[in-house]
Image (tube, rainbow, N blue to C red):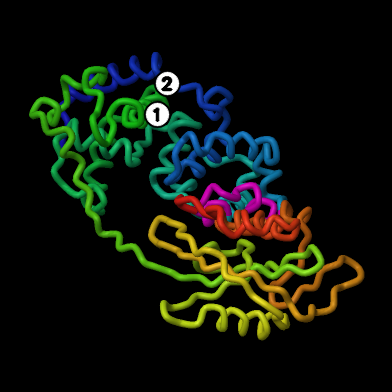
Amino acid sequence: MNVHKETVKQIQVRLLRWYKKHKRPLPWRTKKSPYRTFISEVMLQQTQIKTVIPYFERWMKVFPTVEKLAKAPIDRVLKLWEGLGYYTRARNLHRASQIIVEKHGGKIPSDYETLLSLPGIGRYTAGAVASIAFDQPVPLVDGNVARVFSRVFNIHKDILKPETQNELYAIAYQLVPQKNPGEFNQALMELGSLVCFPTMPSCRTCPVSSLCIAQRKGIQESLPIKSNSLKRKKVNLATAIVIHAKKLLIRKRPEKGIWAGLWELPSVAIQNGKKFEEKLSGELKETHGVKLKSTRALSPSLHRLTHLDVTIYPYLFKPASLPSLSPSNGERVRARGKWITKSDVKKFSFPVPYQKLIKHAFEIQKGDRQRSLTCPLFDHDAN
């Protein structure tokens, strides 16, 4: 699609004027640097701004420079990311920081293609960093921009399909100005976030409403078109809460798959109708050498991820005997397993459902059994 030159000019002028007046004072905007832009854009991948802000501020206190991040152990990085979700972003960010230090002298690359070569950096994030941090006239298209374009230019195509994404980027290339490209790209995203809502867009306050074809036709709420091709899968996990002498058994998850590389309460995937308790106790005995004395089933709860519905069936176990503990550090390592105290929890990164179970596990130790067994353990979120 070719955009008329006069339309391009009007969109640029109107959006930049509107953005100057209405932009939010976000922490990565008020104190700007390439590193802060880089971190914020990775955190903002598939995550809302209000969720990212406290994580970003904590991150900057612990890892104020790319060198600090590159030197940090990955477990420390994952712990700081804990609860933000999509943990592959944290691992990619850690690896990218090491590459930046090793190959680029600790400076965030300003070149789009170089940014694109870093782990976890796609064309949206590369465009955002290049334009916002370095004023490179590089376009970007995120969900907000796709929605704005589909309405302004009346695009009746599935925005999730690659060919439509290419068309949206072709429009973005025509619109991004040589001067203040970063401000313009942020203005586009801000417009989608503050005005051009998915439902009931605020067309009366939109600076480009008179240029919007969908608004003129009264069909703005029917756009964009988005396929519902993502099929959700269901996963059942039987999870063991094993407590002995104020110590809790945890273990590290595999480096691939759901919650890769994080720590968990020992869990096994199960099928409906199977003997959850029996399979779980067999896993504990075989993998961690724990012989069980008694069990108690806690209420199962649902945890919704982006593409999975995970139902966790927790069981409280009391071991009949415990593998001998190391006298030097008070814990035994076996098949990625550790025995930890309540004060040790802060040293390890856990997915959200396990954080809540661990909290209640230590409440059980204190004797608060009834509340631990009956109160809701999970919320619905994407981690």
**Residue 212 vertical position relative to residue 229 in the rendered view, above or below:** above
Quadrant position of residue 30: top right
**Residue 99 vertical position relative to residue 290 in the rendered view, above or below:** above
Secondary structure beneath dot 2 equals loop
**Number of callouts:** 2
Q: Amino acid at mark 1?
A: Gln
Let me know if residue 195 is in the magenta part.
no
- What is the magenta range? 73-90
Q: Which mark, residue 23? A: 2
Q: Nearer the viewer, residue 345 or 252?
A: 345
Let me know if residue 84 is in the magenta part.
yes
Q: Residue furthest front?
A: 370
Instruction: Tell me the CA gap for discs 2 and 1.
Output: 9 Å
* Dot placed on the residue nearer the N-terminal end, 2 or 1: 2
* Picture quarter with the N terminus: top left
Q: Does residue 152 appear to the left or right of 353 in the view shown?
A: left
Q: Does residue 337 appear to the left or right of 141 in the view shown?
A: right
Q: Is residue 177 visible?
A: no
- Label 1 packing within 10 angstroms: few (<14), some (14-19), many (20+): many
**Residue 288 vertical position relative to residue 141 in the rendered view, above or below:** below
Residue at x 58% of width, y 72% of height: 267
Q: Main secondary structure of the magenta part?
A: helix
Quadrant position of residue 36: top right
Residue tagged by mark 1? 186
Residue contact at pointers 2 and 1, CB within 8 angstroms: yes
